Image (cartoon, rainbow, N blue to C red):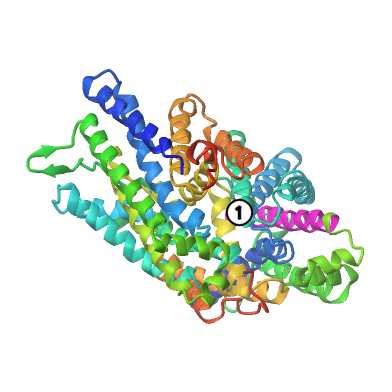
Amino acid sequence: MSFWTSQLLNALSFGALLFLVSAGLSLILGLMRIVSVAHGSFYMLGAYIALATLTASHSYPLAIVAAILTMLVLGALLQRTLIERVGSDPLRQVLLTFGFLLVVGDAALAMWSGSPAIIPVPPFLAGSVAVGSAHYPLYRIAVIFLGLGLAFVLDRVQTGTHLGALVRAGADDLEMLSCMGVNVRRLFVWVFAFGTALAGFGGAVGGVFLGVYPGVDLEIGFLGFVVVIVGGLGSIRGTLAASLIVALIDTLSKSLFPEISLFAIFLLLIVVIAIRPTGLFGRRSLA
Amino acid sequence: MNRRAPLIVCMFLALMLVGAWSGLLASFYVGLLTQALLTALFVMSLDLLVGYTGLDSLGHAAFFGFGGYTAALLSTHGVTNVFPLLLASAAGSGILGMLFGAVALRASGAYFLIISMALGYLPWALAIRWRSVTGGSDGLPGLMRPDLGFGIALNSDAAYFTFVTVFVIVCGIALAAIGRSSFGQALRGIKDSPSRMAALGYNVWLHKYVCFIIAAVFAGMAGMLTGFYTGLVSPDDLSVSQSAFGLMAVILGGAGTLLGPAIGAATIIVIHFTVGSMTPYWNSMLGCIYILVVLFAPRGIFRRFVLARKVKTV
């Protein structure tokens, strides 16, 4: 397989994973206006819990479900017991979620030690498929389809269902939505929990080819924010496009000039902020 | 401003100086106070952004660490005098501030917070990956403490502590003077209502930009002195954890009071090196402190001490 084909596939699969993580962040930031720096913590915890469940039960479906459900519950608890109390001040939200990130990071370090772990490839997705004249891991191909499929479903839900209408209405005018008799508080708990569950799912999926290690929480959280800034808030298509762009730039720059690879992402970030502060697909800015 | 609070702090520091030189104060505590003072300077520079201008930056450690790295790289080329090193760190961080400020200040509010965090991530990642220059995650160890010129060395803990005390007090006075100047008053106005200040003819963007650069310069000098105290600059100095720590200290001490955040920062540093060193779970403790501060002391716990108790009406 040529260098470019494999790089492109790597970027696509990494982009699909980034989409899993950033879709939730985009909702949390775009609809709820909550700046949560703990989003990567849910990714990390999801990966660790999937790995622990897998080691105990040897069942992949169970591992995935465990990661999603625990992150759903933990996210709902975080929103309901802590974040709800600090109101709309982004500074307080950031400090609160950063405190949560520190506690989670420490707990994960104590429970799973600091050495990097990797989730084994599920047997039914092991092996490789022929791409042109060469082979590429089947698992990564499956992740690409998973990401694209999820993007399609989320986009349908957002544009074509009652729930999606609520979310869009909330992003546009929260007070009006509340006046129309929608229980915004409960909607928020669900949206936050849904976002963190997606991040946990991302951890279970990404732990197979990226591994999980201390510090991955900040790394993924950072990339998630870049995706959201580049893509703009509130649009699933924007998030998908931005995930793929960020992943492509990240993958290419890492293989072409590894020492200063992050410069490429920052160049993208700076160009987007300079030309379109609302993001490539966003209609309005957070400010 | 309560006139007594700065006086009490200065008297306390004078007492500690006597203790350090007479040997009554163990060198562990001298080191602790040195670090506390330098962190206080870092946090005061951040307070100029957060408390005065309302720019909640989550990337301020970038300037703290960048100043340290700039001076460390210069010192490997044989510079030993403290003043050129300070100047280099101030210039390095100031230039970085000009670049980052130009980008970040296109946004405001929550968006500014996120963008400042993303920008602050760059120097950190660069320090880790660009091993040939920055030493990677090990950082640049083995920095020799600089001298004062005229043959005066700063090698002993007491001497370094003395220099840091004088320097931080001078910087604190300078920051307070900036805050009290017409420029500082304009910053407060911008925090309350940028649109009104713009209508009054103030160049809001330029005020924010200059404030951002000033804060970067002071943070850089604090980072330089910290690096040369511990003998090491590392990616930790640039990390988002360091930035978040600064923000938390600002809130804990009472944003916009300068002295409050300084005391807040010093308090946490003292707790870190005493209680924190006894437990492997310091990060969890720190995380809980964050959450408690945000939930129960969003306006700070040292505000009372720092501000005048009675408001005198004329």
Q: Is the magenta stretch mostly helix, strand or loop?
A: helix
Residue B130: percent from left, percent from top: 35, 59
- Above or below residue B232? Residue A202 is below
Q: A214 or B164, which lies in front?
A: B164
Residue B102: percent from left, percent from top: 43, 72
Residue A269: percent from left, percent from top: 51, 72
Instruction: Single out the residue that lies furthest toward the bottom.
Output: A275
Is residue A208 in the magenta section?
yes
Instruction: Single out the residue that lies furthest toward the front.
Output: B314
Q: A122 or A133, which lies in front?
A: A122
For residue A208, side relative to residue B240 (left or right): right
Identity of the residue drawn at 29% across and 61% down? B92
Residue A206: percent from left, percent from top: 63, 57
Q: Which chain carries label 1?
A: A
Residue behind mark 1: A37
Asked if residue A135 can be seen in this view, the reply is no
Is residue B142 in the magenta section?
no
Q: The magenta stretch spans which residues?
A: A186-210
Residue A9 placement: quadrant: bottom right
Q: Quadrant of the C terminus of chain A?
A: bottom right
Identity of the residue drawn at 37% across and 35% down? B7
Asked if residue A10 can be seen in this view, the reply is yes
Task: Describe the element under mark 1 as helix, strand or loop.
Answer: loop
- Above or below residue A265? Residue B314 is above
Identity of the residue drawn at 49% across and 50% down? B256
Q: B83 or A25, which lies in front?
A: B83
Identity of the residue drawn at 31% across and 43% down? B168
For residue A128, side relative to residue B198 (left or right): right
